[in-house]
Amino acid sequence: MTTKMNGIYKCDICGNIVEILNTGAGELVCCGENMKHMTENTVDAATEKHVPVITKTEKGFLIKVGEVPHPMEDKHYIQWIEASANGRIYKKFLKPNDKPEMEVCTKDEKITAREYCNLHGTWKKD
Ligand SMILES: [Fe+2]
């Protein structure tokens, strides 16, 4: 199995999470088990909203998680938000009680965004 560029992989045993910066043919292994590819979800079904909401601003874009602010509690929170545009990546790491949002200053006309919830995985908006 080839890894996926910018793919997020998680070890369900110890909690290690890695991101691919260059694809290879090898299997990613941690704690003796294959790491799990975190598939990016794109549709919110539950009451908690995870899909990033991207709004154009004067300086660039504001990304919020999600259309109703996601909880930012000790046991359930957004760990990071990431935006990409024109080959550049912007990433903000968050802690419990932070606002689940990130501002990106860019002149690019379009960005994509994804985020990681410690309980519900990876979500994206193109
Ligand atoms: Fe969540």
Image (spheres, rainbow, N blue to C red):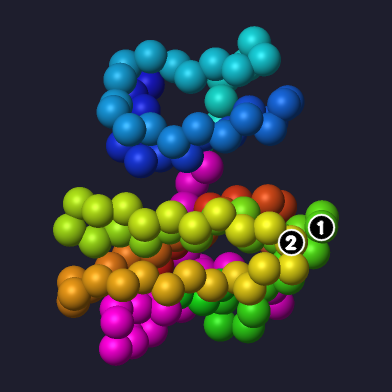
Ligand 1 is within 8 Å of the C-beta of the residue at disc 2: no
Q: Nearest the camera: 21 or 40? A: 21
User: Which residue in the rendered view is the most extreme toward the top?
Assistant: 32
The residue that appears at 43% across and 55% down in the rendered structure is: 91
Majority secondary structure in the magenta region: loop
Q: Position of residue 83 (x, y in %)?
A: 37, 61
Q: Amino acid at mark 2?
A: Pro
Inspect the magenta stretch and tell me whether residue 8 lies in it.
no
Q: Earlier in the sequence, mark 1 or mark 2?
A: 1
Q: To which quarter of the image does residue 57 belong?
A: bottom left
The residue that appears at 56% across and 25% down in the rendered structure is: 35
Does residue 41 appear in the picture of this structure? no
Q: Nearest the camera: 92 or 126? A: 92
Are the two marked residues, 1 and 2, in contact with CB atoms closer than 8 angstroms? yes
Q: Nearest the camera: 23 or 61? A: 61
Is 3 situated above or below 46? above
Q: Which residue is mark 2?
A: 96
